[in-house]
Image (tube, rainbow, N blue to C red):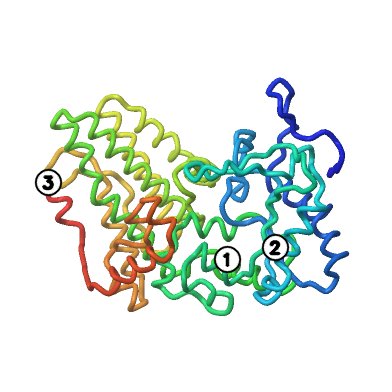
Amino acid sequence: MITPESPNVPESPNVPEPPFVPGLELAAALYEDAVRPLLESAYPLLRYAAARIGPGSEVLGFDTVRSADHDWGPRLQLFLTPEDAERHGGAITGLLAERLPRQVHGWSTHFRRTGDPHDPVSHLEPATGATVDHRVTVHHLPGWLTERLGPRAAAWIDTDPTTADWLALPQQRLAELVAGTVLRDDHGTLTAVRRRLHWYPDQLWRHLMACRWQRIAQEEAFVGRCAETGDELGAAVVAARLAHDLMRLTLLQHRTYAPYSKWLGRAFARLPADPALGPALRAALAATDPDTRERRLCDAYEAAARAHNALGLTEPLDPARRPYHSRPYQVLHAERFAQALQHTVTDPELRSLPLTGAVDQWADSTDLLAHPAAVQAAVDVLSRSGWVQDGREARSE
């Protein structure tokens, strides 16, 4: 319920905040009860899209009451044509600042900016002036796509991304595009882009799973090797890396884009995965002795291997653990799964690539992944280099 004059979000910490409402519900209420009627009255012929997509925990459905402490609240994007955005964007922003209600479901529509370049977030607070500093932002879709996904993204309104384009897209950015909610789409272009990028093409999907198996193959023996030298901390760190790879592999197997690290566990927990997998990973990470760590990691490997066989993409592979050559460590020999998947890839471009995968399979720097143009440049260089690596050098010790 939107109430223009009712008491706003309290400033006093002794007064309870309004009951928590998921951000997507706030976005829908803001649009249906306020933004849509205002636009219908002021711009009756305007065609546009209204959505809540992009950055923000609420887009992925992960927001909680803690999210309300910054950059959260009744938020919405409006997508106009480039011509209408230039002609009307500023006026629409001003209209909403003057006429939006002060609250949605008890939550303020006014966002206070910190003014601090080192803390560039905003916080909900009661509006005391004649206008609200709202977060209904006006865009044109080609510009928004370019900003969020990279310099080639505007073309995806009409055409499919190339292989090089896909490899330069972090899964977090893809998740932000295809999740959330679209409340209106008069032109159908936003819906078309979301449908086009909803999931990887089949050949690329196979290749990316092969790349993730390859990463596991390169380090699965290191847990035992570290423990053998008395390096318990090192063994635990490698086990955590392998758990991370297994979780992201499982998301790939279930055709679900992986969010960044803060939400990875929650996204993983939503999957209808093998019931043995999650407990095995938790036990491996909690283990304080080498035998338990190795045994529980192998339980997790075997669960992931069974999930691979259930996909039916390759001939069934033996999911059982086995010795690492002549050394006394138990592993899966995950390269078997990488090779089997890559053998099913018939696309010549993908077959020519090393098993490094998409950008967030080989880079996790926030400062890189947050800059799409830099990511695209890095992927282009790697793709042109002709570099091929099978990973054996990394496993030689």
Furthest-top residue in this view = 14
Residue marked by disc 1: 144
Residue 194 lies, in percent from the top left, at 60, 66
| Residue at image location 20% in from the left, 57% down from the top | 391
Kind of residue at badge 2? Leu
Mark 1 and mark 2: Cα distance apart in space: 11 Å
As displayed, is residue 151 above or below residue 208?
Answer: below
Left/right placement of residue 40 relative to residue 65 reads right
For residue 44, above or below residue 309: below
- Kind of element beneath mark 1: helix
- What residue is drawn where x is 60% and y is 39%? 70
Front position in the image: 131 or 334: 131
Q: CA distance from mark 3 to mark 2?
A: 55 Å
Callout 1: few (<14), some (14-19), or many (20+) C-alpha neighbours within 10 Å? Answer: some
- For residue 97, side relative to residue 378 (left or right): right
Crowd class of label 2 (few under 14; some 14 to 19; many from 20; radius 10 Å)? many
| Point 68% across, 77% down: residue | 83
Badge 3: few (under 14), some or many (20 or more) residues near its Cα, within 10 Å? few
Image position, residue 328 (x, y; %): 15, 38
> Which residue is label 2 attached to?
78
Amino acid type for the residue under numbered disc 3? Glu
Residue 326 coordinates in the image, percent (x, y): 11, 44
Q: Residue at x 36, y 71 (%)?
A: 345
Q: Which residue is mark 3?
A: 397
1 or 2: tag closer to the N-terminus = 2
Q: Horizontally, is 44 left or right of 159 in the view?
A: right
Q: Nearer the viewer, mark 1 or mark 3?
A: 1
Q: Quadrant of the N terminus?
A: top right
Mark 2 or mark 3, which is nearer the start of the sequence? 2
Q: Are marks 3 and 2 in contact (CB under 8 Å)?
A: no
Q: Is residue 186 left or right of residue 141?
A: right
Estimate the spatial distance between the alpha carbons at disc 1 and disc 3, rounded to whole Å. 47 Å
